[in-house]
Image: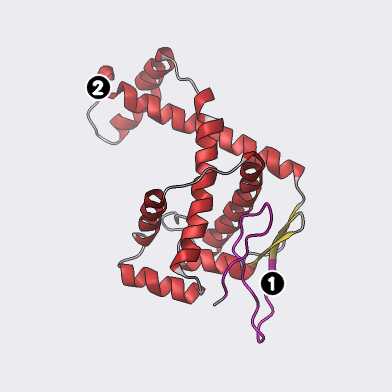
Amino acid sequence: MKGFRLAAGCWLLAVGASAATIDRVAAVIDRDVLTVSEISQMADIRFFPRKAGQTDDDYRHDILESLIAQALRFRDVERFGAQDISKDSIEARLLEIQKRFASPSEFTAALARAELTLDEARTLVKRQLQVEAYVQERFAPLIFVSSEEIDSYYRGDWSQQRRQRGLAIPPLNDVREDIRALLRAGRLQTEIEKWTAQLRARANVDIYSWK
């Protein structure tokens, strides 16, 4: 079993090279190394969602970028103390990943190909959820969406998108909270991207390969 490494301040799978294979370096984040085999592991178990019609090469590149972002974010989480995550939350996220396969047995087979145990997959899920919990605690309370912004979005982009899809446009009061949640989610993602860019700017990140 390859297993995985959880380097100090990093969020990476660890793939030990066998006697017959020398693993290749995909990226170096300061002094932490991410290998091509680690990307293959994540691709095998479909840890990150894959866009419809995405090529294998593009998917692997997205995985590399996601692993780098998660590693940088988890360092910040550890500085302030990672929250404990309930077993139910971990199992729920693991089930989401499993549903990316046609059956539970296919997911089990993917874990075997990646040489990961179910408990190792749970550990990776836990770290992902710890980052998400930190984001909710640090950034979510700072995001405010006014009634005026909701009204403007409803009259503009939201209604236009509904018309283009041939859908009815319900009264604003029926969808006000849905639009508020949509706008909040968009702004939260913007804050996450800004935070990640700042973390990356302070780190030395060198990318070599993802194939």
Q: What residue type is labelled 1?
A: Arg
Q: Main secondary structure of the magenta part?
A: loop
Residue 170 drawn at (x, y percent)? 23, 23
Helix, strand or loop at label 2? It is helix
Read off the magenta span.
2-25
Question: Does residue 80 lie above or below 152 as drawn?
Answer: below
Labels 2 and 1: the sequence-earlier one: 1
Q: Say left or right for 182 vs 28.
A: left
Q: Few, some or many C-alpha atoms within 10 Å of disc 1 (few <14, some 14-19, many ≥20)?
A: some
Q: Which quadrant of the structure image shows residue 148? A: top left
Please say whether residue 18 is one of the residues in the magenta stretch: yes
Q: Residue furthest top?
A: 148
The residue lying at 40 percent from left, 21 percent from top is 153
Q: In which quarter of the image is the C terminus?
A: bottom right
Residue at 46% of width from left, 65% of height from top?
Answer: 119
Residue 159 visible to an observer of this rendering: no
**Label ID, residue 121:** none
In the rendering, at what x and y percent does residue 167 appear? 24, 33
In the image, residue 133 lies in the stretch drawn in magenta: no
Label 1 secondary element: loop
Looking at the image, which residue is at 50% across and 29% down? 140
Residues tagged 2 and 1 counted as in contact (Cβ below 8 A): no
Q: Position of residue 15 (x, y in %)?
A: 61, 71
Across and down, in percent, residue 166 comes to: 25, 34
Going by the numbered disc 2, the residue's amino acid type is Asp
Would you name the residue on which mark 1 appears? 24
Q: Quadrant of the rendered structure where residue 106 is?
A: bottom left
For residue 174, the mark is: 2
Give the CA distance from mark 2 to mark 1.
Answer: 54 Å
Q: Which of 113 and 193 is in front in this view?
A: 113
Quarter holding the N terminus is: bottom right
